Image (cartoon, helix red, strand yellow):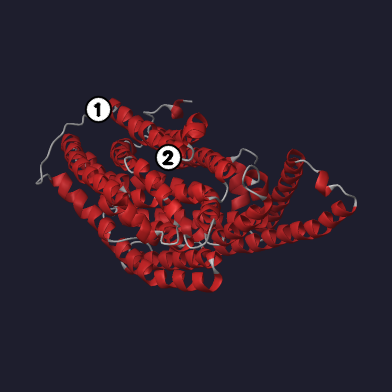
Amino acid sequence: MGMLRPSHAHSAFSATVLLMVSTFLSSIFGLVRNLYIAWLFGRSMEADAFLAAFTLPDMISYFLVGGAASITFVTILTRYRDSGREAEGQRSLSVILTTMYLVLGTAIVLAEIFAPWYVHAWFNGFDPEKSALCVKLTRILLPAQLFFFAGGVFGSVLLVRKQFNVQAVAPLIYNLGTIVGGLLLVKRLGVSSLAIGTVAGAFLGPFLLNALFAHRAGTRYRPILDWHDEGLREWVRLSLPLIIGVSLVTADNWIIGHFASGTSGAISLMTYAKRLFTAPMAVLAQAAGAASMPFFASLWAKEKRYEFATNVADSVSRVACLGLLAASGMIALGQPLIELIFVGGRFSTADARECAAYFAVFSLSMFLWSAQAIYSRAFYAAGNTFAPMTAGTLVTVISFPMYAGLYHVYGAMGLAIASDLGIALQTVAIALLLHQRHMVSLASLDFAELGRCLAAALASGAVVWAAFSWTGARLAPYLVRIGLLNHLSRATGRWIDLALLLAGTAAWLLLTDWVLTRTGSALPHVARKRLKLA
C-alpha cells in the first residue's frame, strides 16, 4: 500500500505497472465517456461537431508548446537535479510558466475570435448549422489548453522524482469531468454540457492535482519574466523542433477529421473506433513510455550508452510483441465488442457494424503505434527533439496526399488504411534514425520473439474470427425461422453478446498461449510468474 502514496518513488517496473493500471482505468472512464456521447448523440450532427471541436485547441497546444510540455521539461529538470541545481530548476519553471501563460493566453484569445474562419476552412464539408455548433463548442474548449500546459509542467516535477501516482489519477478526473458535465447539464445545455465538463475536468485533474502535489514537493511558482534564463532557452531549444514540425502521431486525427467532414457521421464513427483502439494502445505504449522516460533520461545523462540502448530495445520489443497479440484479439472480437458496449440510444446496430470495420483496420497498426512511442522517447531522453520531428514532418507531408487519394477511392475507410500506412512510415523512419546515429541498433530487437508473437497472433485471431463468422452465419437464420430474433430485448441481446465475447476471449487466450508455448516463447512463463500462477 505504500506504493500508492503520492510521494512514493517508483522503480521502472513498478511505475510501468502503476501507469498501465491507471491508463487502463482511464481508458475505462474514456470508454464510458464515449459510450455516453454515442448513446446521447450517435453519429448525429451534434456528435460530429463536438468531436471536431477538439481539433483547434489541440493544434494550438501542439504548435505553441510542442504538445509535450512534460516530456521536454523532464529532460531539463533531470539535468538540474542530477547536477545539484534544483533551485535554478525551480526558477526556470516559474520563468517558463509565466512566459507561456502570456503566449498561450494570447493565442487562445485570437483563436476565440477567428474560430469561425478556421472551422469553415478545415471542416469544409460541414453545413452552416454544423459549422456554427462546432464554432461554439470550440470556443468553450479552448481555455483547457492553459490547464494542460501548466499541469504538464508541474507534473514533470513529480516525474523527475519518480513519483507517478498523481500522473495515474489525473486522467481519471479529466475523463470523469465530461461525464459529470453531461449528467448535470445535458438537459439544459445539450451537447455544450460535454464541453463544459471537459474544461472542468482539465482544471481539476491535469492542472490542480499536479499543482498541489508539486507544491507539496517543494515547488514554488512566482511570476517571473526573464528572456535570458538558461532553463527557458533550453526549453525553447528542445521544444522548437516540436513546434515547427508536425508528427503524424498527432496530425493523423486532424487529417482524418478534415477529409471525413465531407461524409455525414464519419467523424463520429471513426472517432469512436479510434478511441476504442487507443485504449489498449495507451496501456501498452503511453504508460510504458511515460514510465520509461525518466529512466532513459537518467541513463543518457550519466553517459551509460550501452544500458540506454539495451533498455530502449527491450522496451520496444516488449510493447511490439504485446501489440501484435492485442491486435489479433481486437480484430477477431471487435464487432461483438462494439455491439455489446455501444448499441443503444441513438447508436444503432448498423452503426456498430460500420464502426467495427474501422476499428479492425486501425487495430492492424497496434504494434507500430506502440513501438514508435518508445523510440520517440529515446530521442527526447537524449535531449534531441529535432531529428524525430524532422522525420515526422517529412512523413506527414508525404502521407497527406496518400490520405486524400485513398479517401477519394475508398471513402472514409481509405482514411483508416492511410492511417496504418502513415504510422508504418513514421515508425520505420525513427527506428532508422536511432540506428544510424548508433543510439539504438535495430539488431538488438528480439526478432525471434516478435516472430513467435506474430505466428500466435495470426493463428489465434484467424481461428476465433472464423468461429464467430461461422456461428453468426448459421445462428441468425435459425433464430429468424423460430421467430425468436425479433422478440429478443436489447437487455437479453447484451447478455448473449457478453457470453459470446467471453467465450471468444477465452478461446483466443488459450490458443495464443498454446501457440506461444509450442514455439518456445518466454511470454507465457513470464506472465504466469508475474501473476503468481507459476
Furthest-front residue in this view: 128
Residue ID for mark 1: 218
Look at label 2 and name its amino acid: Ala
Q: Is residue 121 left or right of residue 349?
A: left
The disc at residue 11 is none
Q: Residue at x 18, y 36 (%)?
A: 94
| Label 1 close to label 2 by CB (< 8 Å) | no
Question: Dividing the picture into quarters, in which one does residue 492 lie?
Answer: top right
Q: Residue at x 39, y 30 (%)?
A: 8
Furthest-right residue in this view: 482
The x and y percentages for residue 34 are 54, 43
Which structural element holds mark 2? helix
Which structural element holds mark 1? loop
* Nearer the observer, 132 or 162: 132
Can the viewer see residue 521?
Answer: no
Q: Is residue 22 left or right of residue 397?
A: right
Residue ID for mark 2: 195
Using the image, determine if residue 96 lies above or below residue 441.
above
